[in-house]
Amino acid sequence: MKKKNKIVYAFIDSQNLNLGVLSQGWQLDWRKFRQYLRNKYNATDTYLFIGYKPGNEALYANLQQMGYLVILKPTMELPDKSVKGNVDAELVLHTMIQYKNYDKAIIVSGDGDFFCLVEYLESKNKLLHILAPNRRYSKLFSKYSRLVIRVDQLRGSLEFKKKTGIGGRSKP
């Protein structure tokens, strides 16, 4: 009898992941990250939660073409002109809406606000991993340290490298 493959979904707090790797001095290659989730964990559905800013439509379309299921959250401009788009509630909501459709979930965030979700998924044997951007993830997750994968330790394979436009062999 053939063993059934587990259905794995990933739920990504894009701001937490992006700022977490940027704080380490590098930029994530989102295409490579989607391939990593697919190849390493067989993640079939990968939800990417991101704040919506007018003018970034090409970015959202590009992320969808890479295979992400993009969930946009309205943003608001704060008095200091920074933009806030808190996606925590949407990530939890979609994780629970999809609950019956996956066997295992990957939560991509180091934010302790997701502790109750992580705790619940683990209690139901549905948590595969927590992918934290760097070593500075919430201490609340220390209980689940065996499930934490640090994205900063994958820099060599997931870093965005700008194309120089120079290819092939140069003339002598």
Image (tube, rainbow, N blue to C red):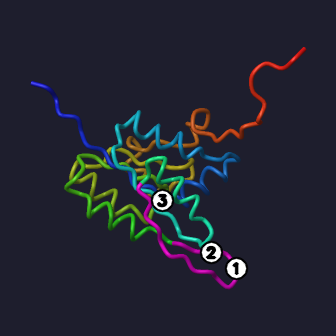
**Which residue is label 3 attached to?**
13
161 displayed left or right of 171:
left
Q: Rounded to the nearest whole Å, what is the CA distance between mark 1 and mark 3? A: 22 Å
Q: Residues within 10 Å of mark 1 (few under 14, many from 20)?
A: few
Residue 76 in percent (x, y) is at 57, 80
Tell me which residue sits at (48%, 50%) in the image: 65
* Element under disc 2: strand
Where disc 3 sits, the SS reads: strand
**Which quadrant does the N terminus fall into?**
top left
The residue pinned by badge 2 equals: 83
For residue 1: magenta?
Answer: no
Q: Above or below — where is 50 with respect to 152? A: below
60 or 51, nearer to the observer: 60
Residue hosting label 1: 81
Please count the marks in the image.
Answer: 3
* Magenta part of the chain: 69-85
Query: In which quadrant of the rendered view does residue 41 lie?
Result: top left
Dot 2 alpha-carbon crowd within 10 angstroms: few under 14, some 14 to 19, many 20 or more: some
